[in-house]
Image (cartoon, rainbow, N blue to C red):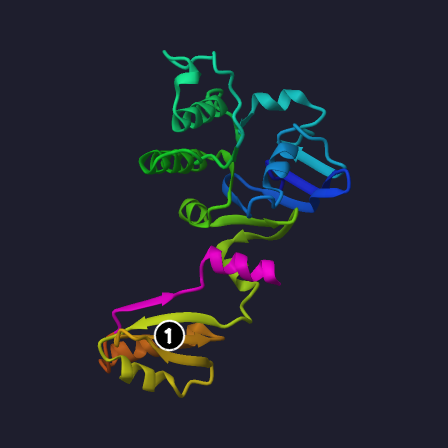
């Protein structure tokens, strides 16, 4: 498969400091989230993809072309940088930008990135400065662009924003891609780690007694509220099956079943420590 954005063994140094370290990745059409803490290498990677930086090693292709040497590619690429990119005396529809709020400046950057209807859209922390309603509006817009078949690469250090936007992610830390793919695929990378399940039931003691004999159970504790228990297990599907069958047999009622660490925050924290 030829990806709209592909990187092979890409590295970038700033003197002796490594900004991006041997990154190999393929970004497919739709929305992909690039996640990592501040200083992880997200902005450097996006500048490499958009031809603003020359890689120290490796190969980058955007729509089959080298973004550093073939500048015509920018007719088909939109980029919204994290940094401010306007002169104060420039104007939008009716007012000079120097009078804009931070949120309005961010909207203007996004408009500039999208106005030429690009096939590839690269967004560096695009929700910064937006109020909650503005964030929701932009998230809807990004979903629409992805549904149209455009390639949308969105960087963020806020995990729940990306988790609400897409299930296709890449995790970057210290310039390296720790993992990439569907969230479920990345979760499978740490499947040997016990998963924490929160189970709510009005018969919580009966539920706990029923689960206590399972070999897959690592630990079982009761919450102080009296109607929840926390189960840690190496094979959560066994507990899912046992609970489902018990409910069908009318042994007890389960009002909620939540995987507490089956989310990006837990996955990222584990992979960084690893």
Position in image of residue 68 (x %, y %): 70, 27
Expressed as whole percent of the image width and height from the top left, the position of residue 192 reads: 55, 71
Could you say which is closer to the camera, residue 104 or residue 239? 104
Where residue 114 sits: x, y (%)?
A: 47, 25
122 left or right, relative to 62: left
Q: Quadrant of the C terminus?
A: bottom right
| Residue 221, magenta (yes or no) | no
Q: Determine which residue is flagged by label 1.
A: 230
User: Is there any visible trace of residue 222 in the rendered image?
Assistant: yes
Residue at 39%, 17% in the rendered image: 99
Determine the residue positioned at 69% across, 23% down. 70
- Report helix, strand or loop for mark 1: strand
Give the crowd class for mark 1: few <14, some 14-19, many >=20 residues within 10 Å: many
Q: Is residue 9 visible?
A: no
Look at the picture and state if 211 lies above or below 163. Answer: below
Q: Where are the magenta residues, as a range?
A: 254-274
Relative side of 165 to 83, left or right: left
The residue located at (44%, 75%) in the rendering is 232
């Amino acid at each position: 498969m030829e990806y709209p954005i592909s990187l092979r063994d890409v590295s970038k140094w700033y003197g002796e400091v490594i900004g991006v370290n041997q990154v190999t990745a393929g970004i497919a059409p739709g929305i992909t989230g690039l996640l990592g803490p501040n200083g992880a290498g997200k902005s450097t990677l996006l500048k490499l993809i958009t031809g603003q930086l020359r890689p120290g090693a490796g190969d980058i292709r955007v729509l089959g072309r080298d973004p550093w040497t073939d500048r015509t590619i920018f007719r088909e690429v939109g980029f919204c940088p994290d940094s401010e990119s306007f002169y104060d005396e420039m104007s939008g529809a009716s007012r000079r930008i120097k009078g804009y709020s931070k949120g309005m400046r961010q909207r203007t950057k996004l408009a500039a990135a999208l106005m030429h209807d690009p096939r590839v859209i690269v967004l560096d922390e695009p929700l910064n400065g937006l109020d909650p309603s503005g964030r929701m509006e932009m998230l809807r817009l990004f979903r629409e662009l992805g549904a149209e078949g455009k390639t949308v690469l969105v960087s963020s250090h806020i995990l729940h924003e990306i988790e609400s936007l897409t299930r296709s992610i890449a995790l970057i830390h210290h310039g390296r891609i720790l993992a990439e793919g569907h969230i479920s695929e990345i979760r499978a990378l740490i499947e040997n780690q016990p998963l924490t399940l929160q189970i709510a039931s009005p018969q919580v003691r009966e539920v706990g007694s029923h689960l206590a004999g399972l070999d897959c159970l690592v630990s079982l504790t009761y919450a102080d509220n009296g109607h929840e228990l926390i189960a840690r297990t190496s094979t959560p599907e066994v507990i899912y099956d046992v609970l489902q069958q018990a409910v069908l047999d009318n042994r007890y009622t389960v009002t909620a079943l939540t995987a507490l660490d089956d989310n990006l925050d837990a996955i990222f924290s584990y992979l960084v420590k690893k």
